[in-house]
Amino acid sequence: MNGKNISNKIIYWYDNNKRFLPWRKKLSKQNREYYTLVSEFMLQQTQVKTVIPYFVKFINKIPNITSLAKVKNDTLMKHWEGLGYYSRARNLKKTAIKIIKDHNGILPSSAEELKELPGIGEYTSKAIMAIAFNKKIIPLDGNVERILKRVFYLRKEEEISKEYLNSKINFFGSSNRASDYAQAIMEIGALVCKPNNPLCEKCPISQNCISYKKNDFVLKTKNKFNKIKYFEAKIYQNKNTYLLIRNNKFNFLKNMPIFPMIEVKKKKYKYSNSKKINIKLSNMDMKIILNKIDKLPKIKDKILFSRTHAKSIILPSFTKKIFSSISKI
């Protein structure tokens, strides 16, 4: 089967099986570019089903590039609250400002210019070019990687590198409907070529897949090393009032409100009799001692709040998890 037949089968499958996603609606050129920009930022490190409600709320409140460039930081963070990886929101606004200033409010369509914008790297630039500008590019996300690994039965360490997988991407050929085609391949990975128990009977290219012919769908992945770190969080409380600080100390959750924390040695964590919780954050397993202190210290730039007002301030999920554990201390 040649590349043209493969692309026809994939497009046919997509037209009959694609999910309705709010950024795939029929839109004006300007809105399509803006919706693609926002959705691609949100989809960095976050699953589609999680992103959908946040995207809808965000677009309703911040409907275009101009309003994004002008939105107050607190308002921006409130609309992003719960989605995590808050640096994405900050970079998204910086990108909007740069687009207004340097590109007359128009999203650039070249890889070089896109990668000059904050928060846009190799993958996101390709995704935007393919989806927003109908360029014949297939971005290599996790779904596309999985299809390639199975189609070519890639098992060796050197075969699952980004460089090697990119060299195999021409297997898919191309389509004049480049925007739909890029999304179609990713959609097959998400809905059919799943990490576990792939639905090969529904796959339009199963006859081209070596893993299907061998009935062997085990995937080799690169070992991801999650660092284990130990922390002590100080829970300063006076009756129903709690204290938070803006984080300018740790690389995670920059400038977001957290309980005052210090990193500690494993030995201190191990022998502490205080309540302990575990939180996974990015590539780090955080083991945290919760020490409750019944008085509020004099700390500059502190944030005081009560349980009744907790919803009125922007709290990252990380801080909410610690806060939800406090009543059990």
Image: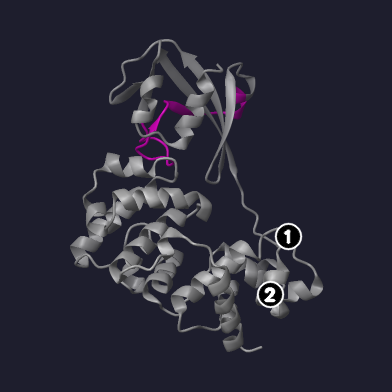
In the image, 321: left or right of 120?
A: right
Question: How far from the left and from the top, in percent, is residue 149?
Answer: 66, 70
Q: Amino acid at mark 1?
A: Asn
Quarter-of-image position of residue 205 = bottom right
Identify the residue under disc 2.
151
Residue 162 in view of the camera? no
Residue situated in front as seen by the camera: 269 or 244: 244
Quarter-of-image position of residue 244 = top left
> What residue range appears in magenta?
246-269
Question: How far from the left and from the top, in percent, is residue 277?
Answer: 58, 27
| Residue at figure coordinates x 28%, y 54% from the top left | 94
**Is residue 109 placed above or below 282 in the rendered structure?**
below
- In the rendered image, residue 327 lying in the magenta stretch gets the answer no
Q: Residue furthest front?
A: 16
Quadrant containing the N terminus in the rendered view: bottom right
Quarter-of-image position of residue 307 = top left
In the image, 175: left or right of 226?
A: left
Describe the element under mark 2 as helix, strand or loop. Answer: helix
Question: How far from the left and from the top, in percent, is residue 262?
Answer: 46, 28
Q: Amino acid at mark 2?
A: Val
